[in-house]
Amino acid sequence: MKILVVGSGGREHALVWKLRQSPRVTKIFCAPGNAGISALATCVKISATAIDALADFAKAEGIDLTVVGPEVPLALGIADHFEEKGLRVFGPRRNAATLEGSKVFMKDLLEKYHIPSAFYATFTDREEALRYIEKQAAPLVVKTDGLAAGKGVVVARTIAEAKAAVDLFMKEKAFGEAGSRVVVEEFLRGEEASFLAFTDGETVLPLPTSQDHKAIFDGDKGPNTGGMGAYSPAPVVTEPLHRQVMETVMLPTVKGLAAEGCPYKGVLYAGLMIDNGVVKVLEFNCRFGDPEAQPLLMRLKTDLVEVMEAVIDGRLADIALEIDPRPTVCVVMAAGGYPGKYENGKPIEGLAKAGQHQDVVVFHAGTAVKGDAVVTNGGRVLGVTAIGDTLQEAIGKAYKAAEEISWDGCYYRRDIGRKALARKGE
Ligand code: AMP
Ligand code: GLY
């Protein structure tokens, strides 16, 4: 079986790594891929958003299954386009991917189907948004309707900050059209968790729980990033909370989407806020999380090709996931300056040594090959991922391997997983 993976991040490296383990897979291509992926797959120089070129490539190469990593091609309708061309693709169609592509669509759907989330109001008029904000109490959260590479959310501590966010999105148009509509919503307190599930539009098959670390600095300080580390499972999601998430969030969302004529097939990712035993939805993503995919796929024992085919064919009810009971953790190593300005092209040392550590996989994100060297090529550069008998052990292994690796300006958080350890009393 020939597979094409679309994307170039740590998530896509983990997908390629996992798909390679399937006895049915003979060849994997990745467009555009990165240095780490090129050791496992043939990288093709096609951008993840060049949908026509990707479909032409898949046709010409006789690709049996295309797996889409990032949200942008999904929001652009890559799944619809591939289906029209008779190509098999894993990922939701454009109308279902709108769940991530439009916060207004998402919030309206949640409201209609009584799925718990923050109170909100939506605006297309800047003056109206500003007048509304003046009547609210801070903190407030202001979000662009459309995709903004994770930068379209401002958690405003004051009314002035919330108004400045509206101006950034609607007046300065920092994210173009994405900010022509904004959502202003209630600030939710609590602890976040990521809840990912496979769904074929009917059956919802949850992956283990996980938790991301969004802020750049230890102790969840500083600006938000794409994610600085993740672990699985997330002890904040207890058994009763897991049931609550399935019954009040995942199943009604999948049913609601189907009822709206947007049946969802793929991985559905709910970003949750948990406070005092109550779950609310912060966001939905229409894909695997990055970095959550790295620790999750390390725990998945079931053949990923089997699961993906069952999703596409609507047979997910026949599938059970086999999960390694041992916890996993991913420590993201980033370029100095990220999530602000940073430099590319720094040679990375110690990759071979780190790769020899037992129970550790170094997933690449922003890396490229330059001559004989592997160099940095993005904000998030590597995701050092480890499995252990306890979370403490997994954390120890990941950091030990990370210490082998260095480049000019290399930065990573030192407290990945600490919250879970505190909760478990480890
Ligand atoms: P989103 O992309 O909507 O998940 O927002 C990114 C991050 O902003 C989330 O992971 C939270 O850390 C934070 N956030 C978003 N919405 C809220 C909210 N209503 N209350 C508190 N924090 C939020
Ligand atoms: N780790 C957050 C995301 O993938 O959106």
Image (spheres, rainbow, N blue to C red):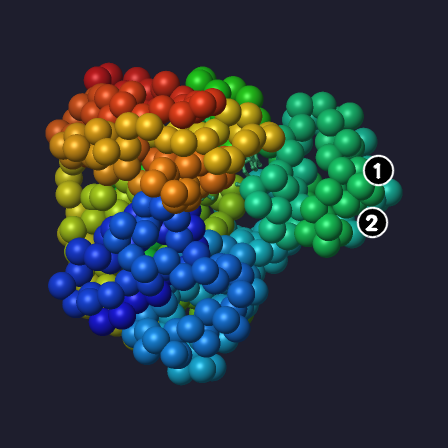
Quadrant in the rendering for residue 371: top left
Q: Which mark is residue 125?
A: 2
The quadrant where ligand 1 appears is: top right
Q: Write down the residue under mark 1.
A: 131
Residue 324 vs residue 199, the one in the foreground:
324
Instruction: Rate crowding at label 1 as few (under 14), some (14 to 19) or many (20 or more) other CA atoms within 10 Å.
Output: few
Residue at the front extreme of this rendering: 371
Residue 417 vs residue 202, the one in the foreground:
417
Residue 8 visible in rendering = yes
| Figure quadrant of the C terminus | top left
Instruction: Rate crowding at label 2 as few (under 14), some (14 to 19) or many (20 or more) other CA atoms within 10 Å.
Output: few
Picture coordinates of residue 286 (x, y %)?
A: 46, 56
Quadrant in the rendering for residue 272: top left
Picture coordinates of residue 128 (x, y %)?
A: 84, 44
User: Residue at (34%, 75%) from the top-left corner?
Assistant: 61
Q: Which mark is residue 157?
A: none
Up-down relation of residue 315 to residue 135 (above or below): below
- Left of 317 or right of it: where is 383? right
Three-letter code for the amino acid on which mark 2 is drawn: Asp
Residue 232 visible in rendering = no
User: Residue at (53%, 61%) from the top-left corner?
Assistant: 49
User: Residue at (50%, 75%) from the top-left corner?
Assistant: 81
Which of marks 1 and 2 precedes in the sequence? 2
Quadrant in the rendering for residue 137: top right
Three-letter code for the amino acid on which mark 1 is drawn: Arg
Picture coordinates of residue 157 (x, y %)?
A: 67, 23
| Figure quadrant of the N terminus | bottom left
